Every structure is written in structure tokens, then in C-alpha cells.
Image: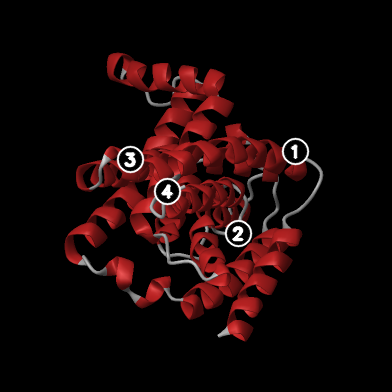
Amino acid sequence: MSEEIIPFIFICIKSFFLGIVQGFTEFLPISSTAHLIVIPHIFGWNDPGVSFSASIQLGSAVAIIYYFRNQLSLIVGSFFSIFKHHNVFKDHNTRLSTYIFIASIPIFVFGSLIKLYWPNYADSNFRSLFSIAIISIIMALLLALSEIYGNRKKLFKDINIRDVILLGLAQALAIFPGVSRSGITMSSALFSGIERKTAARLSFLVGIPAISISGLVELITIFRTLSLIDILPTIIGIISSFFSSIFAIDFFLKFLAKNNTFVFVYYRLAFGVFILSAL
């Protein structure tokens, strides 16, 4: 093999591994972005960067769409029926499509403002290991409090607009590495009294627009700046994140049917302490 091929193969293997990390951690309340920063640091690799991290989220977005494909086909149809019947609460799927739309607004507004007015955000202290460690510990405590004080009695039919707005505002905070989109939305839903498995399904579904659009924007940026062969590692990462995401979604829903989220609280506390001890 030539000297150029061996490093490229290593980059592809690294992208495959990071895609698996992305898929496993996107839907568990432990922050995929934090792991995509910390794990390369542990192995002595370069930070994959915001564009790569966001792009391989597309695999996770496709995984949610695939996993909930039957329900989503009804949700999409119901969303467009709103314009015909002018009734946002006509049935279960129409309500859910409305909730997904409302919950997506804050993160798009917040993300757009950061893109426009904070161009150096990718190099800010929020992506530092110290920041990730502190945020991880804070989010662990928040998830623990939501488990302790949330009554977890609400099913989907009991969810109201206030619950969805709070969930959407919470999701917007996931822009900061270490927060965990799944973790913060789960915490918000539990604080609102929503039952765990319902909270997880709602968290997954409202994340589809944010994860998909963020990934597409960054992937388009990569396509514009790199050659086709240089994009291959990113494509490999997207594919591996798809398969690991399918596993993570199925595991988490089955896990929450019988368990609470304290194992993830302990993990996040240990993760944060480990990072601080390594600094």
C-alpha cells in the first residue's frame, strides 16, 4: 500500500468507530457531542469538528425515521391535513405533528442566532473538556431530580402545549456539548409528569427535524469544500451511526419499560469526574 492509502484507511476506520459512538450515545441521555469530543481526545486523535459531528447525526435521524416509519407516515399526513381542515387537534397524529413542529422552533431559532452572530462558536470554551465535564455533572443532577420529583403519570393524551413548549426550550440547550438532547428533553418531560416510555418516544420524535436539518446543512457544507473521495469517511460514519442508532433506540425504549434512568445519572457523574481528573 502507498503511504497515502494507509492514513486514509485509518481515517475511514476512525470515522466508522465514531459513527458507532454517535449512534449509541445520541438516544441515551449521555450526550453524543460530548463523547465525540472526549473519546478522540482519549485516543490522541484530533477533534473531528462540528461539521463531521453534525453530519454523522444524519445516520441517527434516518434511524429514527426508519424505526418509527409507520407512525411517521401518519404524522406527516396529519400535519398537511391541518392546512386543509384548520384543526391542529383533530386526532392523535395531528396533535403529535403539531407538537413536533412547536418543539422544534426554539432550537432552530437559537441555532440560527448562533450561526449568524457567533461565528467562532465551534472554537469557544463550550467545546472544552472542562466545560463538558461540568455540564455533564449538572445534567446528571437535573435528570436525577426529574426522576425524584416527576410524578410520571401523564400518557400522550394528557400532554399539553405547556409541556411541549418547555420541552422545545429544553431541546434548544442541547446545542451546548455535554447537555445531551435526549437527556435534557427526557428531564423536561419527566418534570412535566410524563411517563418514562412516552417521554422517550416524544423525545425521539421531536428530535427528528433538528437532527436532520443540522446534519444536512453540515453535510452540504462538506460536499462544497471537499472532493468526493474526502467525503467517504463521513459517509462511512453516517452508515455506522444508522445501525448503532437503531440498536440504541430499541434498547432504550425496552429499558425504560422496566427501569428508571438512574444508571445514566451515575454514568454521567462518573464521566464528568473522569474528565476533570484527567485535566
Of 192 and 203, the residue lying toward us:
203
Q: CA distance from mark 4 to mark 2?
A: 35 Å
Nearer the viewer's eye, disc 3 or disc 1? 3
Say which amino acid is labelled 2: Ile
Mark sitting earlier along the chain (4/1):
4
Q: CA distance from mark 4 to mark 1?
A: 42 Å
The residue beneath circle 4 is 5
Residue 59 place in picture, x, y as percent: 48, 38
Q: CA distance from mark 3 to mark 1?
A: 39 Å
The residue beneath circle 1 is 254
Which residue is at the far right? 258
Residue positioned 51% across, 64% down in the render? 34
The residue beneath circle 2 is 30
Residue 11 place in picture, x, y as percent: 46, 52
Mark sitting earlier along the chain (4/3):
4
Q: CA distance from mark 2 to mark 3?
A: 32 Å
Which residue is at the far front? 1
Q: CA distance from mark 1 to mark 2?
A: 17 Å
Determine the secondary structure under disc 4.
helix
Residue positioned 48% across, 30% down in the render? 96
- Does residue 145 appear in the picture of this structure? yes
Mark sitting earlier along the chain (2/3):
2
Determine the secondary structure under disc 3.
helix
Mark sitting earlier along the chain (1/2):
2
Q: Are marks 2 and 3 in contact (CB under 8 Å)?
A: no
Say which amino acid is labelled 3: Ile
Residue positioned 44% across, 23% down in the render? 94
Nearer the viewer's eye, disc 4 or disc 3? 4
Determine the secondary structure under disc 2.
loop
How crowded is the residue under tag 1: few (<14 C-alpha within 10 Å), some, or many (20+)?
few
Q: Are marks 4 and 3 in contact (CB under 8 Å)?
A: no
